[in-house]
Amino acid sequence: MRKHHAQIRMPSIILSLVFIISTISFPHVVNATDEASFSLIEYVSSHDIHSQAEFEAVIQQHCNQYYQPMVIENEVFFQIEIEYENSLVSTLVVEDLGQTRGEKTGRATKNYYSDTGEIVFTIVIEGRFRYSSTEVRTLSASGSYSKPPLSLWNSTPTISSGNVTSNYAYALIYGTATSIYGSQNYSLAVACDKSGNITGV
């Protein structure tokens, strides 16, 4: 009985190994028809996505786009917007990067994607703030505009900082990205209130 039992199990073990090897050896290929019919704009219009990680999972699954995922330290806010004029989808991530002795650092990142899921450009703004129970002010502001090598969108951003009131201080990046497809105005701010709360707009 034991010998007969072993003979029955052996083929199932071999089949399992073949399945595992074939799964590892042959990566998932998105059907060309499915890929061509997928619209990122339509998807985000009809689905709730709550974080950058969830959004990147959608890109990986439906758009067959592979890129280095964002490293997010402490996501405190996430938002998706659709720029219908240029058929772009943007994601906004705000991070609270921590504090030391009444100082707080925040960062906001906005990625712009084509309707097929490719990143066309990214803007980042980071601000360091000093806050107390009576006021808050911006100590420094830095930002950047970047794009993948094949992207045709170009821009030179402007960075500024200051106080809206004694309750809020901000760091801001803004400008206009242009390409053969058109132009896209952008602005992104990270702010801090006198309680040390980081927000982004």
Image (tube, rainbow, N blue to C red):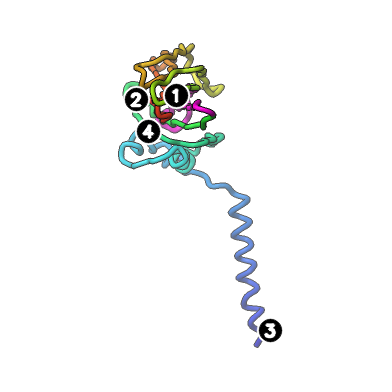
Circle 1: element type: strand
Q: Residue at label 3?
A: 3
Residue 33: percent from left, percent from top: 42, 40
Q: Residue at label 4?
A: 79
Q: Say few, some or many: other residues with alpha carbon within 10 Å of mark 1 (under 14 / 14 to 19 / 20 or more).
A: many
What whole-number distance in Å separates the C-alpha atoms at marks 4 and 1? 26 Å
Circle 2: element type: strand
Q: Say few, some or many: other residues with alpha carbon within 10 Å of mark 4 (under 14 / 14 to 19 / 20 or more).
A: some
Q: Is residue 193 left or right of residue 2?
A: left
Of residues 191 and 48, which is closer to you in this image? 191
Mark 2 or mark 1, which has the lower sequence index?
2
Q: Residue at label 1?
A: 131
Position above or below: 166 against 106: above
Q: Say few, some or many: other residues with alpha carbon within 10 Å of mark 2 (under 14 / 14 to 19 / 20 or more).
A: some
> Residue visible at 63% across and 69% down?
13
**Can the viewer see residue 188?**
no
Q: Residue at label 2?
A: 83
Mark 4 or mark 1, which has the lower sequence index?
4
Position above or below: 14 against 27: below
Q: Is residue 86 left or right of residue 111?
A: left
Mark 4 or mark 3, which has the lower sequence index?
3
> Residue visible at 39% across and 41% down?
50
